[in-house]
Image (tube, rainbow, N blue to C red):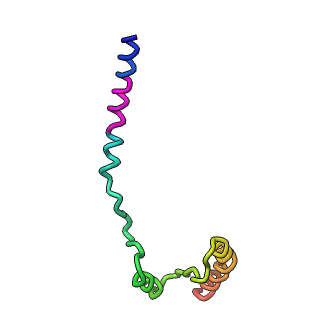
Amino acid sequence: MDFTATLLLTCLGVAAVFLMPFWLSRGSTDPAITSLVGPILGANDQAAIHDSDTSLIPMPDHLRTKDEMVTWLIQELPRLTSGQHKHGQ
């Protein structure tokens, strides 16, 4: 019985030694955004996007439900993007 308990405690100790670095490293990681592109935080950022010369097509504000948004993405967005390609050429 003593041998079994000793063996079990030894196995638990070895497992703890291997798992401890993973547990400790979780607390020290910085959840900061590492992207080179800054996040869109407010109305000024939205205005800067709309004023830029990109091909961003904003989703209309009147879409509220997921179904409305999916319908717009499937039906209207392809028409808008095909119009951009025709005008760009």
Tell whether position 19 is magenta: yes
Please identify the quarter of the rendering in which residue 20 is found.
top left
The residue sitting at 35% across, 41% down in the picture is 22
Residue nearest the viewer, comparing 71 with 7:
7
The residue sitting at 67% across, 80% down in the picture is 76
Predominant SS of the magenta segment: helix
The residue sitting at 35% across, 48% down in the picture is 26
x%, y% of residue 62?
Answer: 60, 83
Tally the numbered discs: 0
Please identify the quarter of the rendering in which residue 3 is found.
top left
- Residue 63, compared with residue 16, is above or below; it is below
Please identify the quarter of the rendering in which residue 60 is found.
bottom right
x%, y% of residue 2?
Answer: 36, 12
| Quadrant of the image containing the C terminus | bottom right
In the rendered structure, which segment of residues is drawn in magenta?
A: 11-20
| Quadrant of the image containing the N terminus | top left
Give the farthest residue toward the front: 1
| Image side of residue 80 versus residue 14, left or right | right
Residue nearest the viewer, comparing 46 with 7:
7
x%, y% of residue 82?
Answer: 65, 81
The residue sitting at 67% across, 72% down in the picture is 67
x%, y% of residue 11?
Answer: 38, 23
Tell whether position 44 is magenta: no
